[in-house]
Structures are given as C-alpha cells and as structure tokens.
Image (cartoon, grey):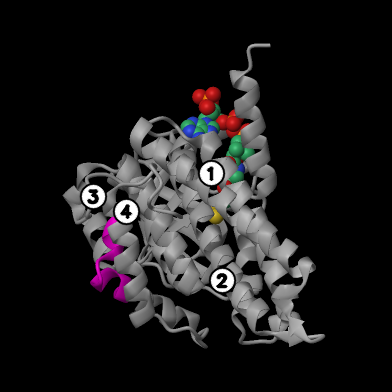
Amino acid sequence: MNTALPFFETKHAQLVEALNAWCKRSLAADEPEDVDAACRDLVQQLGQAGWLRYCVPEAYGGVLEKLDSRALCLIRETLAYHAGLADFSFAMQGLGSGAITLYGSEDLKQTYLPKVAEGEWIAAFALSEPEAGSDVAAMTTTATLEGDTYILNGCKTWISNGGIADFYTVFARSEPINGARGISAFIVPSNTPGLQITERIEVIAPHPLATLRFENCRIPIEQRLSEAGSGFKVAMQTLDIFRASVAGAAVGFARRALDEALQRAKQRQLFGQSLADFQMTQAKLADMATAVEASALLTAQAAWTRDIQGKPTTQEAAMAKMMATESAQQVIDSAVQIFGGLGIQHGTITERLYREIRALRIYEGATEVQKLIIARSLLKGSTT
Ligand code: COS
C-alpha cells in the first residue's frame, strides 16, 4: 500500500521501510521441507525482531497503544510480498490472540499476550468444525459447566497452527440454545489432557493445519472470554479485524506477482521484440496494476475506518477481503501466463504465489460469505 496516502501516518511508512529491509536480510526465499519447524523458527524470528509486538496492545508488550489495523495490514502485505509462510506465522499470532486482546480478563491478557508478542507461545484460532465452516452457528462442540470448570467435548478442523500451537482460542456451545447465542469462547492450552491432534491436513501451500479432538477437556471458568453465550460475537469481532489483514496479504502476493511479471515482460524476447512490446501484454499489466491499487485502497479504507473512526468495520473488511483476494488470484494467474511454462515450474515464485493465494479466498470467511455479509449490511442500512 502506498503509505504516502492520507490513510497512513509517518509511523506506518517507517514500519514498512524497516520491515522491508528486515525481510530482505532475514527471510529465506525457498519453501522449507519441514513446515512445522519453519513456522516455529519464523515465530521466534518475528518475535525477536519485534514484529509480533504489533499483534498485541502496548500494555502487554505491544508497540502501539491498541491493535492498529493499518499496521497489521501493512505488515501482512510486506511479509506476503517476501515469503508466504512468514505472513502466515505473523497472521496466526494475531488471529489466535486477538480475542484475548478484545475480550480477555486482565489475568488472561497478562498471561498470554506478552508471550505472543515475544514469539514464545504460538497461538491458534479454533472455530471451524467438519459440519460448521461457513455456518459457524451450527457448531456442535460442547462446553458444559460443572462447578467452576467447563468440560469440552467435540471436534475442530482446518485449524491453522494445529499441532504446533501452545494454546487455542476455542469456540464451543455452552448454553442449551441452538444458533449463535449459545456459544462461548475459551483459551485452551495445548497440553490440556483430552486434547488430541487426530489428523494433519496437507494443502497445496503447506502450513501446519490439523483436526483437533476434545475429550472431556477440563477448562477453568477463568479461561472463558467475556460472558457465557457471547462467543459468536467474540469470533465475528476478531474476524472483522483480521479479515482486513487477509486483504493486506493478498495485496502483497499480487504486488509481488506484478513486479515479477513486469521484469519478465521487459526481459523476454520473442518475435524480434520484448514481451512488453506487445499490446496484449501491456493490457494485462494495466489490468493487474489497477486491480492491485484498487484492492490496496479498499484495504486501507477498511483499516483506517476501524483505527480512526472507531466504527465497526464488518462491511468494509468484507469488501476489502473479497476484492483483494479475488483480484489477487487473477493478477497472479496473469503473471503465470506472462511467464509461460516457467510460471508453473516447481520452485518458481509465480508457481508458489499461484498456490499460496488460493486459500485466501476460502479462509476467514469464503468469498460467498463476504458477499452475504456485505449484502446483509447494505439491506439493513437501506431505508427503502
Ligand atoms: N460483529 C458483532 N456482532 C455480530 C457480527 C459482527 N461482525 N456478525 C454477526 N453478529 C451478531 C449479530 O448481530 C447477531 O446478534 P443477535 O443475535 O444479538 O441479533 C448474531 O451475531 C448472529 O448473527 P447472524 O444472524 O448474522 O449469524 P449467522 O448465523 O447468519 O452467520 C455469517 C453469519 C455467515 C456471517 C457467519 O457465520 C460467518 O462469518 N461465517 C464465516 C465464518 C468464518 O469466517 N470461518 C472461518 C474460520 S477462521 S479460518
């Protein structure tokens, strides 16, 4: 994103400059063989360099007074430009701990957030279930209160950082009501007896991903976030922040694809001229650059609205996520086309980007869910 735009402050421009330099120095370009080890290392590296301090507020080891959506988006854009797995590791520290920042008791904040910021503890967000992905309110994992302890039973799947996380933000049905109002949120340490990783899930852009099973996991009532029954709102408000940051990551992936394509188009010679001399290539490049800038603007607007106007940004974040992820997919596809066969060869940047972008149109609310959210918000605000 262009940090000279009025959405941003000097601190944002300085942040991007410093992070860019760090990425060039510190991040490996190749995809690792052992993603678990790589992600553990990345969290440590990001923590030691101070970047994870943007995932928590100042009072708990953060850099800025409160979670700053613009900083989160810019960091994800920059990391995604350089290395998808670094973006993943950063994003999960934020998403996995975001609900603690928003709704945790003072004790929970003091215990968990500084460790997240230092990269000492790895965080995860456990919302989806085999029969409750887009339809979160259909979840069946239960949390039954016995005295001062909740007993958790059920299954969560597609959990990023599953298997390497030190704790999970888990959503479960605690009240005898169907639908959104019966859900509560809990912080569950990964060494809780009865919590097992039952399956590792392999995907086209590898990262730690797993199915978890909870069998009579005993969780003290103090580990619950906010009021009993408020878990759905806890989840949605956490996602409102991090969906905008997914858009930031998509802009980073797309911008990298555009830069690679520009370079290739200028260098590649065919039919006695460069690829860039063909109007068909120029039209592609123009569409790509326009899509990147439009996505960056919507992303900056969503982040700015939250930071400065302090308004709920459900609709803005959904628009940014939908636009940025969908158009990044097209931008990257065009870059692959410009590279020709080389674009799909294992180990090339375009091939990696082509695989990495796909999940962003699905996770943290598929494009179809974002459309639902936008339309509902428009209709609610409609006076006709
Ligand atoms: N902020 C605060 N409150 C919200 C909210 C938000 N962003 N979104 C919904 N709510 C509230 C509603 O106001 C409603 O409150 P009341 O019961 O007090 O009226 C309640 O939550 C239920 O909302 P709604 O009726 O809209 O819920 P639905 O079951 O229809 O679900 C969608 C709405 C589809 C938007 C939701 O299930 C969703 O986001 N799904 C995708 C989940 C996702 O991102 N999964 C990926 C997991 S992380 S990789």
- Magenta span has 54? yes
Q: Is residue 125 left or right of residue 286?
A: left
Q: Residue 110: x percent and y percent?
A: 19, 52
Residues drawn in magenta: 44-57
Q: Residues within 10 Å of mark 2 (few under 14, many from 20)?
A: some
**Which residue is disc 3 drawn over?**
64
Distance CA(mark 4)–CA(mark 2): 22 Å
Q: Residue 337: x percent and y percent?
A: 75, 74
Choose mark 1 or mark 3, whichever is in front: 1
Distance CA(mark 2)–CA(mark 3): 31 Å
Judging from the image, what secondary structure is the residue with disc 4 in? Answer: helix
Which mark is first along the chain, 3 or 1? 3
The tag on residue 259 is 2
Choose mark 2 or mark 3, whichever is in front: 2
Q: Are marks 2 and 3 in contact (CB under 8 Å)?
A: no
Choose mark 3 or mark 4, whichever is in front: 4
Query: Which residue is pictured at 67% across the width and 51% down the height?
Result: 131
User: Which amino acid lies under the numbered mark 1 shown in the image of this protein?
Assistant: Leu
Judging from the image, what secondary structure is the residue with disc 1 in? Answer: helix
Choose mark 1 or mark 2, whichever is in front: 2
Query: Which residue is pictured at 49% across the width and 55% down the height?
Result: 248
Which mark is first along the chain, 3 or 2? 3
Closer to the camera, 155 or 165?
165
Q: Residue 235: x percent and y percent?
A: 47, 43
The answer to whether residue 358 is above or below residue 221 is below
Query: Which residue is pictured at 52% across the width and 88% down the height?
Result: 33
User: Which amino acid lies under the numbered mark 3 shown in the image of this protein?
Assistant: Leu
Q: Are marks 1 and 3 in contact (CB under 8 Å)?
A: no
Which mark is first along the chain, 4 or 3? 4
**Which residue is disc 4 drawn over?**
12
